[in-house]
Amino acid sequence: MSKKQAEADKLSDEPIAPTADTDSAAEGCTPEPNPEGAETPDPEPADGLRTQLDEMRDKYIRLSAEFDNYRKRTIREKADMLKFASEDTLRDMLPVVDDLERAAQAVETASEVEALKQGIALIIGKFHEFMKAKGVREIECLGQVLDTDLHEAISKIPAPEPEQKGKIIDVVQKGYTINDKVMRFAKVVVAD
């Protein structure tokens, strides 16, 4: 064996001393002691961020629950509104019903027909006032030109006079609007 080969074997058996190049490569593997005056990373900012994250998560959960409660409450209120929407109207109609019941009782014992007619006319007038207060109006028909947005022609008859041609001469069933929206079309007879 030569002298050079013996030295190479000797070197391979000895541990390698760290150099400047190996220090930078091993830096990520093992922590080195900090030189004096150097600050160590503070774990408190991470704790502060975690606390802030927990607070934001809590606010999000509470806001989500509050919105869900709001949504359920509005659905319930809408259902109640639809359920009881006609309550005011029907309550206002009760006096008319009372009057009709009194008229029915009076018919049984009445001896004067004229008084009954007047009583029924008063009840009808009261009911018409009630409907006007609720925005319900009767559609004017007689003598008007047929308007298919308001009238439904159910029959045509020959015009008795030439100026009545195309006009309504009879109303079979009255039509009504509520706040300018047709509730029921008037069924009419038109002169042809």
Image: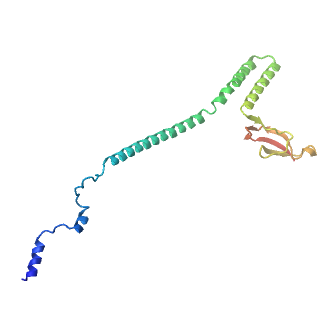
Residue at x 44%, y 44% (from the top left corner)? 60
Which image quadrant for residue 109? Answer: top right
Comparing 76 with 150, the one in front is 76
Instruction: Tell whether 61 sits left or right of 171.
Output: left
Comparing 28 with 163, the one in front is 28
Residue at x 33%, y 46% (from the top left corner)? 47
Q: Which residue lies furthest to the bottom in this view?
A: 2
In x, y percent, where is residue 72?
A: 51, 39
Q: In this view, does 11 lie above or below 50?
A: below
Which image quadrant for residue 137? Answer: top right
Q: Residue furthest right?
A: 162
Residue at x 13%, y 68% (from the top left corner)? 15
Comparing 142 with 155, the one in front is 142
In x, y percent, where is residue 150?
A: 77, 43
Q: In this view, does 90 lie above or below 22?
A: above
For the N terminus, the image quarter is: bottom left
Instruction: Tell whether 78 sits left or right of 16.
Output: right
